[in-house]
Image: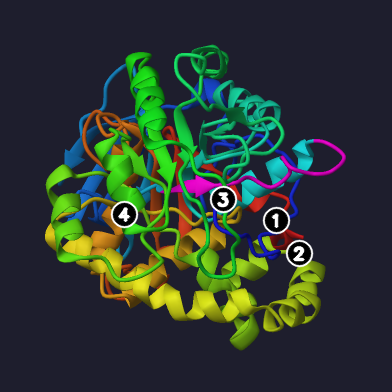
Amino acid sequence: MLPRPAWIVAVLVLATSVIHAMPGGAEPVPQDEYNGIIIENVTLIDGTGRPPVAGISVMVRGDRIVQIGRGPFAMTMEYPGPRTIDGSGKYLIPGLWDVHVHLSGGRGRGGPDFDAGIRALHGFVYSGITSIFDAGNSPDFILSLRQREREGEIVSPRIFATGPLVTTPGGHGGGRGMTLIDSWPEAIEALDAHIELQPDMVKFTFDEHGWGTRPLIPLLDPDLMGRAGRYFNEHGIRTTVHISHEYRAIQAIEAGIDTLAHPIIQGPVSDDFVQLMASKKVPMVSTLTIGEGYSRLVEHPEFLDQPLYRAVYDADAIERLKTTVRDQYAARAWTTWMKVMTPVAQENLRKIVAAGGVIVLGSDQSAGPQTHRELELMVEGGIPALEAIRIGTLNAAIFMGRERDMGSIEVGKLADMVLLAADPLADISNAASIEIVIKGGRIIDRAALDLPVNR
């Protein structure tokens, strides 16, 4: 992971239950009376990259999308009275993903803080993010929350997680609780223990540092990484890898690692690398926000006054960010280095997208508003808004190997959707103009969450 700004403070909310309610003050719908949803006459942006289509109706039964068309849809005895939402003048997109999260609460000195984790999860789902991939955390913390989410105990995006990182002793992220390997076949015992945790994807780190203001550290042997990656694949587990340099990215791709957890940020990518990414279709996560956040806070702290930030960040946290944390960032050489290199990373991503490569949205942070900032930075860097939405939806499902049932609004897929009040293609910041969040066919009552906006 890249160095983390201190302002990825989790939003301060309490865990609640999902309430199936209609907007506008309608009464909650008890679960045993829940008979589906029809969103009528909406402009559909389905996440596939196809142009938007106006006047569409989308029908949900249970947790799946069952019909898309111009309606009206026929009722059945099984689903006699679905809830109908008027989508006139509104825009329907798939639920957003963030596939590079380090969820708040897992790394405290006093042990995991599950309340902090749940507060951060509430902030994500309030912001329209219906799926996240935690790319490195305390296994006891994140895997426990994953279980609670899958059992329906907490309001949360869908949680996918890696658990421990895999690296060499002294390597990037190779601290306490990590899976450390340095030889083969001696590594197999550690890999088997890792597999027992049932990670959704395994993350390697492959970075010797020596760039920016970072010291040199030991590097995982690429041949060993390849052997370990194949071992995980043979057990049905996909892999990703922390890289920052084109040369290391190429080595990881040649070793057979499935995805790249970061963009190339140490310098401009070569044309050969762009073509490699286009031909191999190796998903690469964007993570622009983590570096840009330093200079943004120093130079434009007013961004914290935007509605979505005020909705999920506590007022005391915002004040601390604008004062104490801002002063700390202003004094750091890292802030200047990342300000210079972020536009380089933006252009690298744009070139890969233009060539047909697979870029995926990930913020490397732990707050829903930062996921939206990631969209903004991609569009500011020259990626079309329609493609940015695909990057934050279907491409993310591809990254996780879940594109058959997630990531787009298509018949048969899970009904994870967000209804917007304004057109995100006219202005990508309109992706934050959220009216309704639907996860698994059920409407999240955002007004019931204990967020600052609701207090």
Q: Position of residue 156 (x, y in %)?
A: 58, 38
- Residue type (three-letter) at the residue carrying disc 2: Asp
Vertical placement of 273 versus 444: above or below? below
**Contact (Cβ within 8 Å) of mark 3 with mark 2:** no
- Residue type (three-letter) at the residue carrying disc 3: Phe
Residue carrying label 2: 314
Q: Earlier in the sequence, mark 2 or mark 4?
A: 4
Distance of label 4 from label 3 (alpha carbons) = 34 Å
- SS category of the residue bearing label 1: loop
Name the residue furthest bottom.
299
Q: Earlier in the sequence, mark 1 or mark 2?
A: 1
- Residue type (three-letter) at the residue carrying disc 4: Tyr
Distance of label 3 from label 2 (alpha carbons) = 15 Å
- SS category of the residue bearing label 2: loop
Residue carrying label 1: 11
Q: Please indicate, yes or no, whether residue 54 appears anywhere in the rendered image.
A: no
Which residue occupies the foreground of this view, 281 or 144?
Answer: 281
Q: Earlier in the sequence, mark 4 or mark 3?
A: 3
Picture residue at 38% right of the left edge, 77% below the top: 343
- Read off the magenta span: 97-111
Picture residue at 74% right of the left edge, 42% below the top: 107
**Contact (Cβ within 8 Å) of mark 1 with mark 3:** no
Q: Tell which tag, 1 or 4, sits nearer the viewer.
A: 4
Vertical placement of 330 versus 282: above or below? below
**Contact (Cβ within 8 Å) of mark 1 with mark 2:** yes
Vertical placement of 59 versus 227: above or below? below
